[in-house]
Image (cartoon, rainbow, N blue to C red):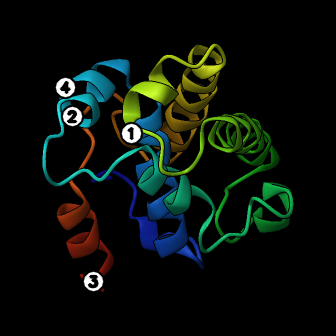
Amino acid sequence: MAGMPLNDMPWWRWRANVRSALHMLSDPAFHQNCWAAGAPGYGDVTDAVYRLVEDTWLDNWSAEKYVGTVFRDSQEAALVDVVVLRVLRIMHQVGADAPVTAYLQHHGWPEAVRAAREAHTRLAFNDGDDPDTRPRTLDELAAALHTI
């Protein structure tokens, strides 16, 4: 998130949290190397899902509601809506407290990852960032959210 300043969006902190969640959800290597391995600093799948929907309430309404505040355009919003629906469906089926492996082994997980990758890539490019950098730790995200 070093290209275009995130704070050009009115609710840029929400955008940063959504982008962080999408980034982590979109990377199968990250899932294995960080979440499944229990690497400190990145939380788990449930943490990512909560970052995706916590402030935005995207579990209750469409991301379209936030075009111009969190999302730059309707395409970003539509891509995020797909991710939210897929990961919440999986979370409800396996349980919020399920181990990471339950998510990774779920039959719908590959589609959720693909959807997250599409959304993450679109948001990263729109912010002038490289979508293939490693996800930030939660401490790095928190520090970025408190810089302004």
**Left or right placement of residue 15 versus residue 141 in this view:** right
Residue 68 location in percent, x, y?
73, 67
Q: Nearer the viewer, residue 132 or 125?
A: 132
Mark-to-mark CA distance, 1 and 3: 21 Å
Mark-to-mark CA distance, 3 and 4: 28 Å
On the image, numbered disc 4 is attached to which residue?
33
Residue 118 location in percent, x, y?
59, 26
Is 142 situated above or below 135?
below
Residue 47 location in percent, x, y?
43, 56
**Is disc 4 in contact with disc 2, using a CB cutoff of under 8 Å?**
yes
Q: Secondary structure at mark 1?
A: helix
* Dot 3 alpha-carbon crowd within 10 angstroms: few under 14, some 14 to 19, many 20 or more: few
Q: Residue furthest left?
A: 40
Q: Amino acid at mark 1?
A: Met
On the image, numbered disc 2 is attached to which residue?
34
Q: Secondary structure at mark 3?
A: loop
Residue 24 disc label:
1
Q: Amino acid at mark 3?
A: His
Q: Nearer the viewer, residue 144 or 98?
A: 98
On the image, numbered disc 3 is attached to which residue?
146
**Left or right placement of residue 82 versus residue 145 in this view:** right
**Is disc 2 in contact with disc 1, using a CB cutoff of under 8 Å?**
yes
Comes first in the chain, label 2 or label 1: 1
